[in-house]
Amino acid sequence: MKIGFGCDHAAIDLKNELLVYMREKGYECVDYGTNYDENGEIIKCDYPQKGEQVGRAVVSGEVDYGVLMCGTGIGISIAANKVPGVIAAVCSEPYSARLTKQHNNANIIAFGARVVGTEVAKMILDEFFGAEFEGGRHQKRVDMIFDIERRNNK
């Protein structure tokens, strides 16, 4: 499985720690930034850019899933959700992360570096990537979400 990671300048350190964690678990990870420059200075960026970039990578199949981080996870997830085909959910605890995969078939998980610590973020990723979409009654609702998207993207 290939996972795309993206963040703004508020979440660089958390993103970098999680990249190591997920690679150690055997996942192939793509770092879409942002990061530090060669002098150790933060490369600032606006979270909508990274939300869109990772969202497009997921929808195009360049990566299978996305992980997004900003200060709260809210703005970057909103930006990603503007890309048709994305279901991004901001989750600050593991239970919601598992259910958003099982019930909503989310393809991007987001959280805030100023909201969750490293260990909670790892638990969120473990639950999200350990879960599978249940389909069944949930598929009808996911289809309804994409119907809303189609009706409003004309």
Image (cartoon, grey):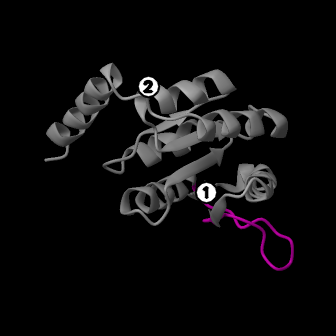
- Visible in this render: residue 41? yes
Q: Is residue 75 shown above or below 39?
A: above
Q: Secondary structure at mark 1?
A: strand
Give the residue drawn at x 15%, y 38%.
151
Q: Amino acid at mark 2?
A: His
Residue 144 point in image, percent of width and height: 23, 28
Q: Amino acid at mark 1?
A: Gly
Q: How many marks?
A: 2
Horizontally, residue 74 falls left or right of residue 44, namely left
Q: Which residue is mark 2?
A: 103
Q: Say which of 136 and 122 sits in front.
A: 136
Q: CA distance from mark 2 to mark 1?
A: 24 Å
Q: Is residue 101 shown above or below 83?
A: above
The mark that comes first in sequence, 2 or 1, is 1
Q: Quadrant of the N terminus?
A: bottom right
Instruction: Say the numbered circle drawn on residue 6.
Output: 1
Closer to viewer: mark 2 or mark 1: 2
Q: Secondary structure at mark 2?
A: helix
Give the residue drawn at x 65%, y 54%.
8
- For the record, the magenta segment spans 31-46
Instruction: Say the numbered circle drawn on residue 22.
Output: none
Horizontally, residue 73 falls left or right of residue 85, namely right
Residue 3 point in image, percent of width and height: 58, 57
Horizontally, residue 148 falls left or right of residue 59, namely left
Q: Is residue 23 magenta?
A: no
Give the residue drawn at x 62%, y 37%.
130
Residue 63 point in image, percent of width and height: 50, 61
Q: Is residue 34 magenta?
A: yes
